Amino acid sequence: MPAMTIIIAIVIALLGIFLLGAGINALRRRSLRNQTVRKRRYNLALIELTLAFCLLSFAALLCTVAVATRGYQALTREEVAAVVRVEPSGAQSFTAQFRFPDGRQAHFNLAGDQLYVDAFILKWKPLANFLGLHTAFELDRVAGRYMKLEDETNRPRTVFSLTAPKFLDLFTLRQRYLFLANFLDAEYGSATYMMAQTPATYEVRVSTTGLLIRQVAEPLPAVQ
């Protein structure tokens, strides 16, 4: 998704640079004696410079969006966001070993009765789809969740990030720049949780309707 957006931005930027050069070249030409022709040339140059500025600004916006969506995965159907191995380690505590599609792994010690995972969902409007931007997701946090409300209030809380630090983040840009609302509805999150009291392996999946967790069947032990 970001690659297609960057390609479109480059094409728009090249067109903007061409118009910028044409406008500057028209202004640098020697003045003509014919007042009407000279006025038309200046007007045309101003139009070219204005279009160049608009195209270059739009190309810069597309590049910013492409950088801000880095780390998000395109979502066109149900996708496996991570495989998680859960192992109880004591009363209301367990470990969660994450394995992501890109090969990364992460290990967390969590307190609670259930494994909790949430994610950001980026849902673009049709105008942005035309520019190569489609619904995407990124896992955000993992936590331990207690079944009883009083435990949730009084027992230790464990929450960890599943995202890598970013120079730009589209959710932050959406809150700062209101004009992005014409392209993106970014204020959308989803969460899911599953019991973690027995050893098990789960797939954290993302569909167009949100997050879900499915248990993966354990392989049978080899016969001796």
Image: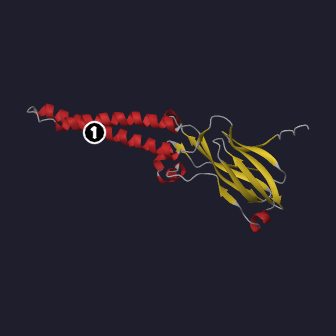
Q: Residue at x 19, y 33 (%)?
A: 41
Residue 70 is situated, as x and y percent measured from the top left of the image, at 54, 44
The answer to whether residue 129 is visible is yes
Q: Quadrant of the C terminus?
A: top right
Instruction: Please state if 128 lies on the left or on the right of 15 as rendered.
Output: right
Q: Secondary structure at mark 1?
A: helix
Residue 67 is situated, as x and y percent measured from the top left of the image, at 49, 45
Vertical arrangement, residue 142 with respect to residue 223, above or below: below
Q: Residue at x 57, y 45 (%)?
A: 71
Residue extending farthest to the left is: 33
Instruction: Please state if 54 lies on the left or on the right of 7 as rendered.
Output: left
Residue 99 is situated, as x and y percent measured from the top left of the image, at 69, 46
- Nearer-the-camera pick, 204 or 207: 204
Residue 217 is situated, as x and y percent measured from the top left of the image, at 82, 40
The amino acid beneath tag 1 is Leu
**Residue 13 in which image quadrant:** top left
How is colour applied across the structure in the image? secondary structure
Query: How many numbered markers are drawn?
Result: 1
For label 1, count other residues whose C-alpha is less than 10 Å away and answer few (under 14), some (14-19) or many (20+): many
Q: Residue at x 51, y 39 (%)?
A: 2
Mark 1 highlights which residue?
Answer: 49
